[in-house]
Image (cartoon, rainbow, N blue to C red):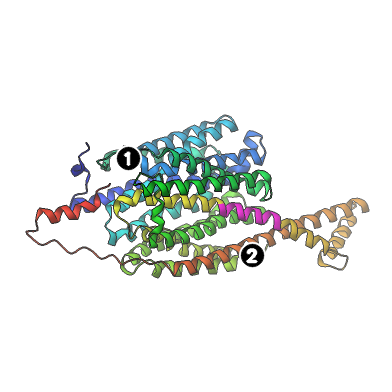
Amino acid sequence: MHDLTTAAPQPGGARFSYKWMVTLVVIFGAFMSILDQTIVNIALPRLQHAFGADLDSVQWVLTAYILTQGVVTPTTAFFADRLGTKRFYMLALAIFTAGSALCGLAWSLPVLILFRVAQGIGGAALFPLAVTLLYREFPPHQRGLASGLLGIAALLAPAVGPTLGGYFVTYVDWRLIFFVNVPIGIIGLLLAALLLREVRPETRTPFDVPGFVLASTGLAAVLYALSDASIDGWGSGKVLGFLLGGLFLLGCFVLVELDRARRNRQSLLDLRLFANGPFLSSNIVNILITFAFFGGLFLFPVYLQNLRGLNAFNAGLLLLPQAFASLITALIAGRVVDRFGVRVVVVPGLICLAFATWQLSFLTLSTSYRWLQMLFVIRGLGLGVVIQPLSVSAVSDLHPRKFAHASTLYTVMRFVSTSLGIAVLATLVQTQAQIHAGDLAGQVTAASPLGQLAARLQALLMRHGVSTAHARAAALQEIARLVQQQGYLLAIQDAFRLVLFVMIASIIAACFIRMRKQRPPAPQQEGQGVGSAKETLEPMLPG
């Protein structure tokens, strides 16, 4: 039997120093797992060229990673209990690092997709384990601070990803987007081996096989449908089949898990956590804000590269100040959350995000880059006080032994809402772009601005010796390009309007978050008995 007394945090200064060691270790894993969700996106066109493949095939580099994470994440709590949190964290980090190295060595697209699956197996557990490790060591009245520190990884990675990936793809080699994880992973493994203490429960719980089969197949089907919807459309038989089939399997999973809970049997995901008010309300806001956040990340590169003509690196640089704004407010928000609660920081942060989104819905092809960067900074300031504080309120009324299950379930909901946001907005942009382009084309007449532009362009070409037929064809081709470009811009404006509605819904939902204010524990009186010390340590022990 594992000796829990050696694993439990020590009182006084030792415990104080240990929680900072945990913070140092888990930031590496959390940063890598989130970075890899964004750094690859910007390399897809380069991967098409490198492997001579079409977009549908290359899309599986992203889809395989997302599907794998959706399948593996629900097992995090079980393996953390069975192997110990430290051992499982190190194993996940090692698999992720090895998978990253293999991805960089891939010699064909199928091999790269296979190695992305291996990378996803390791990456799925890193963020929920980081939350579990941190919240186990930080007392309740300091978890806002802990969330602010974890926000360094959660917010910096998505902003740095496009910049770093854009630089590698534009100026070096696409393989570096995977190799960059290797030294970070090795450092993280060494720190984990040297600094982390093992914590394991005294009892071993059986693996929930029916729950795993239903959850993994259901989540994989839903995530695949959402990933494919942006390519084949929501009306596709394949998309609808996988989506409805996945939802049916997840419905069966809910029934099976609730039945196991009634019979006091171990569940893969403890769905009873949704009966906890702060956990439920925080998850609702988390789903809405993740939809808006990752949807926005998808729209920005499309606008900056496809419509404004920036290369991948310059587009990433324009987004970079958003990351630093997020870091500043994340650290400040952590302190404020500990003193005044979550709503005090989350609601103003959501209002900042809503304002930036509202302004982004008026983007034009000549919007000043300075104003764009200002909107990105406002968006970053809002994100910094929203993302991580929600994870604090989610576990604010839970026993520490529930942290692994809570962080796993919270992460699963984030995966689904991320995929949903990208799928919905990608499909919306594609369909609305066609509709707007058709409407604009129908408005082109000889007297319209575009018609007059075509006439001037044709006349200019003819003055330079181009034949009438060729000049007319060139003018019409240019008008068609402008119509398509304007149609795409109007579609992006529509997408931001949808995001704005989601933001307003998240503000309303955030007003219902109830979180008890955590106060620092009173100092122990001298001569306090052993029984009181045991009560103080017990909440820090799992199981």
Q: Quick one: which residue is furthest to the top in this view?
A: 107
Reply above or below: 289 against 538: below
Q: Quick one: which residue is furthest to the right in this view?
A: 468
| Residue ID at (31%, 64%) | 338
Badge 2 marks a residue whose secondary structure is loop
**Quadrant of image for the N terminus:** top left
**Image-based side of 15 in relation to 456, left or right:** left
Tell me if residue 27 can be seen.
no
Front-most of residues 125 and 293:
125
Badge 1 marks a residue whose secondary structure is loop
Question: What amino acid type is highlighted by mark number 1?
Answer: Thr
| Residue ID at (52%, 58%) | 293
Position of residue 153 measured from the top left corner of the image (x, y, whole percent): 41, 51
Task: Name the residue that disc number 1 marks.
Answer: 205
Front-most of residues 535 and 183:
535
Task: Name the residue that disc number 2 marks.
Answer: 363
Magenta stretch, main secondary structure, is helix
Is residue 427 covered in magenta?
A: yes
Position of residue 436 measured from the top left corner of the image (x, y, whole percent): 74, 60
